[in-house]
Amino acid sequence: MRLEDMFTSRRRNDDPLEMLAAQIGDLRRQTRDISRALSHNAGDVAGDLGELMTDWGRDAARQGAWLAGAASRKAVQGARAVQRDPVPLLAVLGTAVLLTSLLSSRRR
């Protein structure tokens, strides 16, 4: 609030251009305050989002490591099974080759 607004009885008649300039000045201050508040809030949101992405990345890395370990264990189990008895593997490979040759000859 301006000093002139407090003492209205002694206030002189304002020029419309001065009133408009005062309103523009008030708008500039309000715009500056809003801009500061928005930039402060945007910084907070960006920080929170960064923390969230970091947490998601850690969880994804942890789950990826667990999946890689599980796949490795299954691969080792499969390799041992093939070492003990290679006939099922040969049957699966033979079936895959047969299906591939049948489908490729059918497309010709």
Image: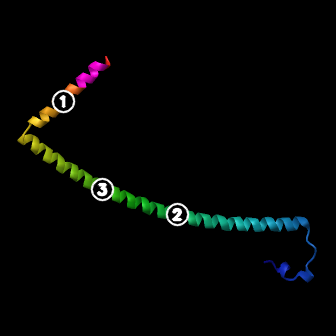
Mark 2 lies on a secondary structure that is helix
Quick one: label 2 or label 3, which is nearer the N terminus? Answer: 2
Q: Per the image, is 102 magenta? A: yes
Label 1 crowd (10 A; few <14 / some 14-19 / many >=20): few
Nearest to the eye among marks 1 and 2: give it: 1
The colour style of the image is rainbow
Label 3 crowd (10 A; few <14 / some 14-19 / many >=20): few
Mark 3 lies on a secondary structure that is helix
Looking at numbered disc 1 in the image, what kind of residue is underneath it? Answer: Thr
Looking at the picture, tell me which residue is in the foreground, 38 or 68: 68
Q: Which residues are magenta?
A: 100-106
Reading the image, the residue beneath label 3 is 63
92 shown above or below 27? above
Mark 1 lies on a secondary structure that is helix
Reading the image, the residue beneath label 1 is 95
Q: CA gap, disc 2 to disc 3?
A: 27 Å
65 shown above or below 12? above
Looking at numbered disc 2 in the image, what kind of residue is underneath it? Answer: Val
Q: Is residue 43 left or right of residue 20?
A: left
Q: Quarter of the image containing the C terminus?
A: top left
Looking at numbered disc 3 in the image, what kind of residue is underneath it? Answer: Gln
Looking at the picture, tell me which residue is in the foreground, 57 or 85: 85
User: Percent position (x, y) of residue 13?
Assistant: 93, 73
50 shown above or below 99? below
| Residue displayed at 9% across by 35% down | 87
Q: Quarter of the image containing the N terminus?
A: bottom right
Q: Is residue 24 left or right of residue 48?
A: right
